[in-house]
Image: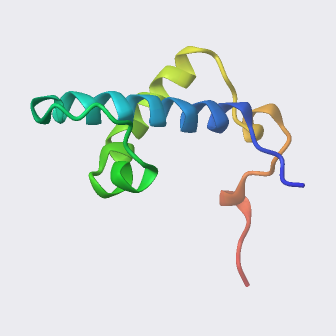
Amino acid sequence: MKTISPFWRRVRELMREIAIREYMWSNRQLGVWNLPTDEELKEGGYLERAKSEAIRIAQMEGLSTLKKLGLRKDRSQTHLR
């Protein structure tokens, strides 16, 4: 089973929360209050715009990636032959 870092798990969670908030705010004039699907969030670019804010919040919470915890190798050091 693949190990998922708590950092990226939290980033994905925050991305969805932020994207939903932005979607609801931008569509408030329509009077539609249904939660958007993941496809709507992707298509509208809400998830991509939420990513940088989510990363910043996760870093402020003190979460570490697996690489920083020493559980995963740095892929930039691997050379393809």
- Residue 62 in percent (x, y) is at 64, 16
Judge whether 16 appears above or below 78 on screen.
above
From what the image shows, is residue 67 above or below residue 81?
Answer: above
Q: Residue at x 22, y 35 (%)?
A: 32
The answer to whether residue 24 is above or below residue 2 is: above
Screen quadrant of the C terminus: bottom right
Q: Quadrant of the N terminus?
A: bottom right
* Picture coordinates of residue 54, whole percent (x, y): 46, 30
Give the residue at the far left of this rendering: 29
With 7 as the anchor, is 5 left or right in this view?
right
Residue closest to the eye, 20 or 36: 36
| Residue toward you, 49 or 64 | 49
Q: Is residue 60 left or right of residue 25?
A: right
Q: Residue furthest bottom?
A: 81
Q: What residue appears at the point 76 percent right and 39 percent down from the top-left corner?
A: 66
> Colour scheme used in the picture?
rainbow
Which residue is pictured at 56% across the width and 24% down the height? Answer: 58
Percent position of residue 79, x then y: 71, 72
16 left or right of 68 in image? left
* Residue 71 spot, x, y in % from top left: 86, 41
The residue depicted at 66 percent of the width and 36 percent of the height is 9
**11, 74: nearer the viewer:** 11
Above or below 67: residue 1: below
Q: What is the total number of numbered labels drawn onto the structure image?
A: 0
Judge left or right: residue 78 versus residue 59: right
Which residue lies most toward the right here? 1
On the image, which quarter does residue 5 sit in?
A: top right
The quarter holding residue 11 reads top right
